[in-house]
Amino acid sequence: MTMIKSLVLGSAAGLIAVSGAQAADLPVKAKAVEYVKICSLYGAGFYYIPGTDTCMKIGGYLRVDTTFNGGIFDQPAWNGNLGQQNRLRDYYAARSRLALSVDTRTATAYGVVRTFGQANFNLNSSTGEGPAVAGTQTLGVDLVFIQFAGFTFGKSASAYATPWHGYPGNNSSFLLGGHDDVVGTNNIQYTAQFGNGVSASIGLDDPYYNRTQLLNVGLGNASTAITAGTNAYSGARAPDIVGNIRVDQAWGLFQISAAAHEVSGSYNILTPGNLQEISGHPDSKWGGSVMAALQLKNLPTGPGDDIKVDVSYAKGATKNVINTAPSFAMFGSSGRADSYQSIGFGQTADGVYMPVALGGTGDIKLVDAYGIRGAFNHNWDPHWSTSLFGSWAAVRYGGNALDLGTAKGQWCANYNVGKAPSADYSCNPDYNISQLGLITRWTPVANLTFSAEVMWFHLDQKFGGAATMSAASNVAAPKPTTRYEYKDQDAVSLNVRVQRNF
């Protein structure tokens, strides 16, 4: 018994010794995971990615919009079912959006290397255009770019753009009168900094962003439609060449921008079934635009107040003035006994051409456009602010309605076909638009804002008299083919928004 006891105790002691030796061979307990460090080099919200010298910021916003008598983001009722004011239109339009952005920056011997991307998740319960286009869910990519040594590659704001794009003080994404590519366009650009706030940028932009329509206005194409011609742009042949010179100072900002845009047609014959290639095509023309922008800070009206304004002129690059490129068709009442209703009409284009075989000169006639827009932004206190904003813009086809050697003459020759006009009818596709709005914002806590915006839109069309026409090329349009009086039109919309930034 004594021997067995000794063996057991000895074995236990040996096991303990072996266990101790094995424990001594185990690695030391790992250190606690290092917490993410704040990166103060690029402003608030940046953190170092663990194990690297790259700083990253994750942000975005959640926004809920509702617009009454307009489309989402406060688009005026200027065409479609809203412009017709028919029973297919929605009395209000709503959108909920979640925007997520990732911004990374790394200091290098060549300067900061930056990547940025933003994705938008949208639910449109309505667009304002009725049940046929309601209830859509979309994923959008606003900006995706890389910056290195002064260069920018990817989908970013054009070198032509101002810092406020189409938003000098408004919620509306449809303030016309100047350039707007806040969601970016595919481009390559270079920016040089000269010190004291002076910089210059030059870039090559995707031309698909910066064009509206090139109208082939061959005789007989229009029939009784409210528009003239057929869009006849060719494929992309050359990028838009853009640039700016800019001065940023404590008093504000001043910028001059310029853009060159190729207007290139496809074929003379566009009717399905015809041989299009052998019909020939017009020679391309280069158009362009210029813009001057000014921001004034440190106003005597209060801290943080400012004025932003930009002025634009374009020839063959109309979208740099009528920045959402709509064609307008607004209907209202009429006092004429021979008319069913009234219509205000304006077709947006970069240029027109009429083939020689159809009576035209065969070359592209570029369209002129010019505009001004701006806002006064005032802070009542840290929680309340108001902006008064507005714009005015014009489109001019040029020439004489009876001269087929001009853009206006070619356009009218096409448009007049089948219209059975009144005795006092006159054709003039020129038009002006005006907008005036007021927005008030309440920010009860940081990064949470409630706002209400009311906006008036006016279409000053230049036709006279009355004519017979179809309201739209869409056969489902409820408006009859009958006589309409040409008349200026107005629309008023209301947008309410809640937005939380993070």
Image (cartoon, rainbow, N blue to C red):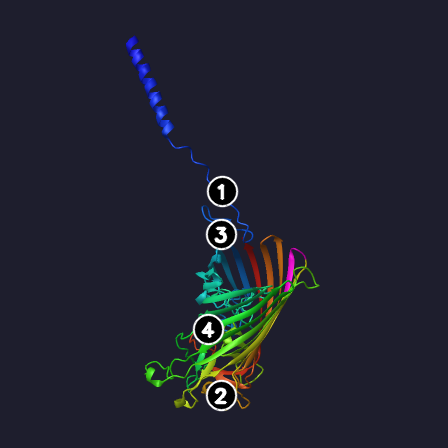
Q: Which residue is mark 1?
A: 35
The reply to whether dot 3 and dot 1 touch (C-beta < 8 Å) is no
The reply to whether dot 2 and dot 1 touch (C-beta < 8 Å) is no
Residue drawn at x 37%, y 24% is 20
Name the N-terminal-most of marks 4 and 1.
1
Separation (CA) of disc 3 from disc 4: 32 Å
The reply to whether dot 2 and dot 4 touch (C-beta < 8 Å) is no
Q: Which residues are magenta?
A: 381-387
Identified by mark 4, the residue type is Asp
The verdict on residue 394 being magenta is no
Callout 3 crowding tier (Cα within 10 Å): few <14, some 14–19, many ≥20: many
Callout 4 crowding tier (Cα within 10 Å): few <14, some 14–19, many ≥20: many
Q: Which mark is residue 56?
A: 3
Q: Which mark is residue 406?
A: 2
Identified by mark 3, the residue type is Met
- Quadrant showing the N terminus: top left
Identified by mark 2, the residue type is Thr
Separation (CA) of disc 3 from disc 2: 56 Å
Residue drawn at x 37%, y 31% is 26
Separation (CA) of disc 2 from disc 1: 70 Å
Mark 2 or 1, closer to the camera: 1
Looking at this view, is 57 or 251 the one in front?
Answer: 251
Q: Which residue is mark 4?
A: 240
Name the N-terminal-most of marks 3 and 1.
1
Separation (CA) of disc 2 from disc 4: 26 Å
Can residue 328 be seen here? no
How far across and down, in percent of the image, does residue 384 sit?
A: 65, 58
Separation (CA) of disc 4 from disc 1: 47 Å
In the picture as drawn, the residue positioned furthest to the top comes out as 2
Looking at this view, is 447 or 47 the one in front?
Answer: 47
